[in-house]
Every structure is written in structure tokens, then in C-alpha cells.
Amino acid sequence: MKFLAVLLAAGMLAFLGAVICIIASVPLAASPARALPGGTDNASAAGGSGPQRSLSALHSAGGSAGPSVLPGEPAASVFPPPPVPLLSRFLCTPLAAACPSGAEQGDAAGERAELLLLQSTAEQLRQTALQQEARIRADRDTIRELTGKLGRCESGLPRGLQDAGPRRDTMADGAWDSPALLLELEDAVRALRDRIERIEQELPARGNLSSAPAPAMPTALHSKMDELEGQLLAKVLALEKERAALSHGSHQQRQEVEKELNALQGRVAELEHGSSAYSPPDAFKVSIPIRNNYMYARVRKALPELYAFTACMWLRSRSGGSGQGTPFSYSVPGQANEIVLLEAGLEPMELLINDKVAQLPLSLKDSNWHHICISWTTRDGLWSAYQDGELRGSGENLAAWHPIKPHGILILGQEQDTLGGRFDATQAFVGDIAQFNLWDHALTPAQVLGMANCTGPLMGNVLPWEDKLVEAFGGAKKAAFDVCKGRAKA
């Protein structure tokens, strides 16, 4: 930058010198000397007082002004002597000693006006050059400021990358693995790129009056900025990869903790209730005899995050045709209707996922046992509804791309308006529920048919129907029941 300032100053001095030389080299035109009016001889004119005598004194103070006039000769026959040359006050250019006529005075006035115009132009050029110098200095300060910021950013990035857990940066107070920091770094890179591009666009226009090596500066600056930008982007990508790795590791760790908690919960249930009262452990049913807002059964196992599921169960409704109520509902913090199977009043049965609704062509009004299966996947929101092993309906766009959130509460027989409570008696299920199983994928039609005709029983891989995992409240009862053997009798 110092070299650029020296070149700019030298160019300005050279330009101003050239302008002065142009001004000084303009000659002042002089017309030939004329005889003085009234027949006055040249000698008397030369010897008279006024400016002419002072001009003659520049060359020869005691010299003769010309030949004298002989007596008897007419004055008109005398020719004026040649003009005495004078020195210009700018350059040694010979000037006529005779007084200028009216035309000469007009020429002199035009030359003075031209001289003033040239001087004004030179002054304007000088002011423009000073302004360009000031703007280039301001750009240099801006470049120095940007370089300093990039240096601080670059020096702050590499620290602490090998440590686990949250990281802190010299530019922000957020954790290194937070999306806010990555967005802040990307915004800073974009802002720096925009400022550099604006400076590069302005510098060529400002450097037209500077010397030839000036355009090399933006190229070097652009190269440096590209290099620093590449380093920043590399650091951002490294942070994103590390965050993804940490997220994956934390997800695996959470799953392991959930498994341990489930195992401990099962052990506690065994210690509290002893061994299962039913043999096998899934040979029981939950009965809700009347419609109210306090009888229900709760599943004691937490669900993981699900991107697909199949829920199958045996149901026998005793509502008398006035709406089957809610066989099951699953709520999570912030969303009471994460998954709900509901038939209210005269409306058809509905499946709600994240408050999105699909109507199902199912019917439980004959008070007989029916095998019901509902499958759903987040991809395109595809759903299917089976009754007694037959596909009754299917559709799409039901809460598409929405994952089922984990750590909620699953209730049998009541619809939740808040997490785990606030039941409505008009939406309660009246009847029997058995073999409620949940999988984390969509079952095939053959698997559904095998469970419905009791030829291929399956246990849910996410939630199996087991005595120790289901607890009855408010007067709901658990009773031994083998659905494949006893549904004909019941």
C-alpha cells in the first residue's frame, strides 16, 4: 500500500508539471509596430514617458531610440524603427516593444481568459487527484479492517475442535455445534464477499488517474480473500461434520439409556406385581364397562421416535351404536393429538396424526370382536386400514414427513386433551381391548391376515401386549382372555 501511495503522488506531481509547462509555453501574440498618430516621430515617441520607456530600459537604458529626422524632411517619409525585443516574464520569448493596438488588446484579453481557464482546469484536476488519494486511503483502511476481522475469525476457529461438548468462539457466545453459530459464520463470509466485490468494482474507476501498476492491487486482494474464504468454509464444513457425528453419537446413547430404563422399569414392575398373573403374559383383556372420564388403561413403556408404525388390536365395542369413542390415544409434550383413533357420535372412525385427519371405512357397531390394524409411514403420509384381515381403505398426505415424537403417554380407552389427562366422557371407549401391539414399520397384508385368523400371531417390536406393561385405572379391569379361543364364546 505504501508503494501505491508513492506512485500516486509521483503521478500527480508529473501531471501538474505537465499542465504548468503547457500554460507557460503559450506565446503572447504581438502585432507589428505602427507609427504614432499625428505625425509624431519615432524618436520623440521613444523618448517620451510611459510604459514604452520602461520596456526599452529592459534591454539598453542608454541606447538610441532610432535615427533623428533631418530638417526640412516631411515626417511621413520617416519609417518607424524596428521594435525593440523584450523578455517575457514566463520564458525568454521576444516581445514587441510597441504599444498594442485595440486588436492586440483583444488578443491579450483572450489569452488571459484562456490562461485563467487552464489554471482553473489544473486546480480542478489537482483537487480530483487529492480526492482520489483520500478515497484510496479510505479503501486501504477498509481492507486493513477486513483483514483484521478475518484474522481474528481464523485464529478463533481451530481452538477446541478435539474436545467433546459445547465449544465457544471468540466471535460468538454460542456452542460450536449450534446451528446459530454456523449461520453466523456463513453470514459473515457472505458480508465480507459483498464488501470485497464492491471495493473491487469501485477501485478500477478510481484508479483511472493513477499509475499503471495500481490495478494489480485488486487481484492480489481478491486472491487473499478467496484463500481466507476457503479456509472459513472448510472450518464450517468440519464443524458441521463434527456436529452430525456428535448428534449421531448422542442418539445412540439416548437409545441405550432408554433400553436400560425400560429394563429397569420392567424389573420394577415384576418386583411390584410379582410374576405375570396370566399365562401366557399376553392372554388378558382390558374392560371398560361404562362411559365416563376416569376409567382407562395406561401403557407403562415410552415410545421412541417413529417414522412409520403399525398398531393392531382386538376390539369389542359395547357403546350401543352411539359412537365407539377412543380405543387409544398417544400424546406428547406440546401435541395432545400425536396419534388418535377415534369415532365420535355419528361421524366415521378417524385417524389423527399431529392433528391431521383421515377418515377410515371401519365399523364396530355389531358388538362383536374385530381385529383392527392401522399402518402409517411419514413418507408421503401413506396410510392403510384393515378390519378382520381385509384392507378396507388407504390414502396419502396424512401428516407427510412428520415423525412421531418420542417420550409421550399412550392411553387405552380415553382421548387426551392434555398430556396424560383431561379426558372427555363423550369420547370414551366402552367395551373390551386385547392384543394391542405396536411395530415401527408397516406390516404386510399377509402378516395382518395371519394375526386376524390366528394362524400367525406376532408381538410388537416397539410395544408388545404384556401384563406388566399395562396398568388399569379408575375401575377399568384386567381379566384373563385368549382372544383366539374365547372370541367365539364371548
Image (spheres, rainbow, N blue to C red):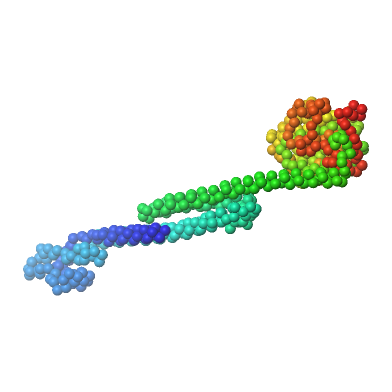
Where residue 11 appears, as percent x and y from the top left, is 35, 58
Q: From this viewpoint, is residue 343 visible?
A: no
Quadrant of the rendered image containing residue 23: bottom left
Where residue 50 appears, as percent x and y from the top left, is 22, 71
Q: Is residue 77 above or below residue 327?
A: below
Query: Is 490 left, or right, of 70 in this rendering?
Result: right
Query: Is 192 left, or right, of 264 in this rendering?
Result: left
In-front residue for pair 302/170: 302
Query: Is 138 left, or right, of 54 in this rendering?
Result: right
In-front residue for pair 137/258: 258
Where residue 239 appears, as percent x and y from the top left, is 59, 49
Q: How many marks?
A: 0
Q: Tell me what residue is drawn at x 83 percent, y 34 percent.
A: 435
Q: Tell me what residue is drawn at x 37 percent, y 53 percent.
A: 213
Q: Tell me what residue is drawn at x 56 percent, y 52 percent.
A: 188
Quadrant of the rendered image containing residue 469: top right
Q: From this viewpoint, is residue 377 visible?
A: yes
Quadrant of the rendered image containing residue 4: bottom left
Q: Quadrant of the C terminus?
A: top right
Q: Tell me what residue is drawn at x 10 percent, y 69 percent.
A: 68
Q: Is residue 119 above or below residue 327?
A: below
Q: Quadrant of the N terminus?
A: bottom left
Q: Is residue 347 above or below residue 422?
A: above
Where residue 22 appears, as percent x and y from the top left, is 29, 58
